[in-house]
Image (cartoon, rainbow, N blue to C red):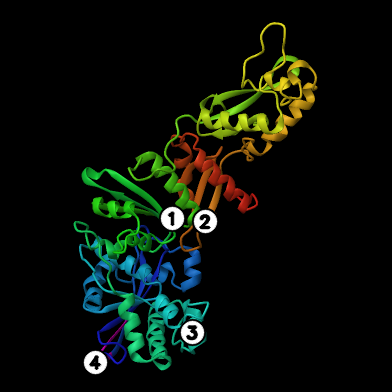
């Protein structure tokens, strides 16, 4: 038993080359063990085997020269694992540190399994009226003593121990123990799923995928917290039949992290169309995408022609193109509604055939629902203007850039650049060196859902993008 909790604890902090546990590597490990024998500190620089980005060097003070002679993680792995095993793993934004260590151990053939306590969540639970819970805020709020350089692994690990000690000064031990027990309680997964998934799922934005028997895609979902959302599907208090059925059928879970919500939405849209999961009814591939094209007809009257998107050069001048629509039915429904609501001529709009011999007047003229463009009573220019005004908000937006653009997302630790050209989402890159290959790859077809997402994001950003 420790003075702070009935079980042994280990406070952990890492410094890394970036935020992606798959691509980046650890540069420093700081560990403070706490048990009945007291507190013991250990730390080591780690040679990551890859260059440390300049902004990471500025943040942590750790540069390539410092780690050049340091041991690799493989050389430290067994020693580090011994220090972690059998203890509650405590870290700030714990899934970050735990995920990095899990990946590093996996690379050398070792496995880490531990109950994980996030001190961000513990601070929120114990101090619900406080707005900020980052480590700098905890230092200021609780008067924690920084002994060493901030943003160095051992310094930050020791601050976590100080925070737990400070919390014991503010709250009864029973309340803290109950909070830790609740935060470290392991949720359950359906039978047949690997329990190790509980450790591996990230608490980051992204997309998750459920597969059934024979690896059949069942469902693609999006969340700002992949782990939390996936586990919610398996909660014992299912309220929806779909959730219960899905939980019974899932045999495998996969996920794709993203730098933020925009990337997650684009990825979800693409994967649903590619995989056609059984339980996704939205965002399915649409084969009837079409648009109205206004063309000069008799006597200069603009008349609509329904064109498939494959007939159009998406991104070219779209002054007289309106849409896109998911189907001919949807396109005709809009035109029909505009004709009835604005007394536009149904003959001119090609919603009804030309009148027979002896009369050019449409039926609308006879019942007072047409202003007479069909018989010259309404000037062509006036009818054209009214039709264009009615369709204005449905105008197919021209691509406003001379070529492809990049929309950045994420922070300095996990940057992504979403590459888009002519409303088509080409993909995301983490490094500029990846751009040429992406631009040369086969272009995806036009997708109406991505088009709308990109339009919304460009408006939100006020058009501030990176020209590529």
**Mark 3 lies on residue:** 139
Q: Residue furthest top?
A: 357
Which tag, 3 or 4, sits closer to the chain's start? 4
Which tag, 1 or 2, sits closer to the chain's start? 1
Asked if the residue under mark 1 is in contact with the one under mark 3, i.e. CB atoms within 8 Å, the reply is no
For the residue carrying disc 4, how many other residues have a C-alpha within 10 Å: few (<14), some (14-19), or many (20+)? few
Where does the image place residue 244, in percent across and percent down from the top left? 29, 55
Q: Nearer the viewer, residue 172 or 162?
A: 172
Q: Which mark is residue 258?
A: 1
Kind of element beneath mark 3: helix
Compared across the picture, whether 304 is left or right of 383 comes to left
Kind of element beneath mark 4: loop
Residue 214 lies, with reference to residue 460, above or below; the image says: above
Kind of element beneath mark 2: strand
**Mark 2 lies on residue:** 409
Question: In this rendering, does residue 98 appear at all?
Answer: yes
Asked if the residue under mark 1 is in contact with the one under mark 4, i.e. CB atoms within 8 Å, the reply is no
Q: Residue at x 62, y 35 (%)?
A: 396
Where does the image place residue 235, in percent across and percent down from the top left? 31, 63
Q: Nearer the viewer, residue 223 or 409?
A: 223
Q: Nearer the viewer, residue 366 or 408?
A: 366
Which tag, 3 or 1, sits closer to the chain's start? 3
Cα distance between the residues tagged 3 and 2: 29 Å
Asked where in the image residue 73 lies, by quadrant, the reply is bottom left
Cα distance between the residues tagged 1 and 2: 9 Å
Which quadrant, please, contains the C terminus?
Answer: top right
Where does the image place residue 372, in percent across and percent down from the top left? 76, 21
Q: Which mark is residue 445?
A: none
Q: Nearer the viewer, residue 303 or 307?
A: 303
Asked if the residue under mark 2 is in contact with the one under mark 1, i.e. CB atoms within 8 Å, the reply is yes
Which residue range is magenta in the image? Answer: 32-38
**Mark 4 lies on residue:** 37
């Amino acid at each position: 038993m420790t003075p702070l909790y009935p079980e042994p604890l280990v406070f952990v902090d890492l410094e890394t080359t970036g935020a992606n546990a798959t691509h980046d590597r650890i540069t420093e490990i700081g560990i403070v063990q706490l048990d009945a024998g007291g507190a013991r500190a250990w730390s080591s620089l780690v040679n990551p085997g890859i260059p440390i980005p300049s902004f990471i060097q500025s943040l942590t003070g750790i540069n390539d020269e410092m780690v050049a002679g340091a041991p690799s993680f493989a050389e430290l792995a067994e020693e580090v694992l011994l220090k972690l095993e059998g203890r509650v793993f405590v870290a700030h934004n714990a899934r970050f540190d735990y995920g990095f260590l899990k990946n590093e151990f996996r690379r050398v053939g070792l496995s880490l399994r531990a109950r994980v306590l996030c001190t961000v969540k513990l601070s929120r639970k114990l101090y619900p009226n406080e707005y900020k819970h980052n480590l700098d805020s905890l230092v200021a709020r609780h008067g924690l003593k920084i002994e060493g350089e901030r943003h160095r692994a051992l310094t930050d690990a020791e601050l976590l121990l100080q925070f737990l000690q400070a919390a014991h000064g503010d709250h009864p031990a029973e309340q803290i123990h109950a909070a830790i027990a609740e935060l470290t309680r392991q949720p359950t997964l359906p039978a047949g799923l690997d329990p190790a998934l509980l450790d591996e799922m990230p608490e980051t934005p992204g997309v998750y995928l459920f597969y059934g028997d024979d690896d059949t895609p069942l469902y693609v979902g999006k969340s700002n917290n992949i782990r939390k959302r996936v586990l919610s599907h398996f909660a014992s208090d299912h309220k929806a039949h779909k959730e219960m059925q899905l939980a019974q059928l899932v045999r495998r879970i996969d996920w794709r992290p993203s730098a933020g919500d925009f990337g997650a939405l684009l990825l979800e849209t693409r994967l649903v169309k590619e995989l056609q999961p059984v339980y996704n009814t939205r965002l399915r591939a649409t084969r009837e995408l079409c648009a109205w094209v206004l063309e000069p007809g008799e006597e200069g009257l603009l008349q609509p022609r329904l064109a498939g998107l494959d007939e159009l050069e998406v991104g070219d001048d779209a002054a007289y193109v309106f849409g896109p629509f998911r189907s001919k039915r949807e396109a005709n429904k809009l035109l029909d509604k505009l004709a009835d609501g604005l007394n536009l001529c149904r003959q001119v709009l090609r919603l009804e055939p030309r009148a027979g011999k002896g009369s050019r007047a449409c039926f609308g003229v006879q019942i007072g629902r047409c202003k007479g463009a069909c018989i010259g009573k309404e000037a062509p220019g006036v009818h054209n203007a009214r039709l264009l005004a009615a369709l204005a908000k449905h105008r197919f937006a021209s691509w406003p850039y001379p070529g492809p653009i990049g929309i950045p997302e994420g922070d300095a630790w996990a940057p992504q650049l979403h590459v888009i050209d002519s409303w088509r989402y080409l993909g995301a890159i983490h490094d500029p060196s990846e751009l040429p290959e992406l631009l040369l790859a086969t272009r995806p077809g036009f997708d109406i859902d991505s088009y709308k997402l990109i339009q919304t994001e460009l408006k939100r950003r006020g058009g501030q993008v990176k020209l590529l």
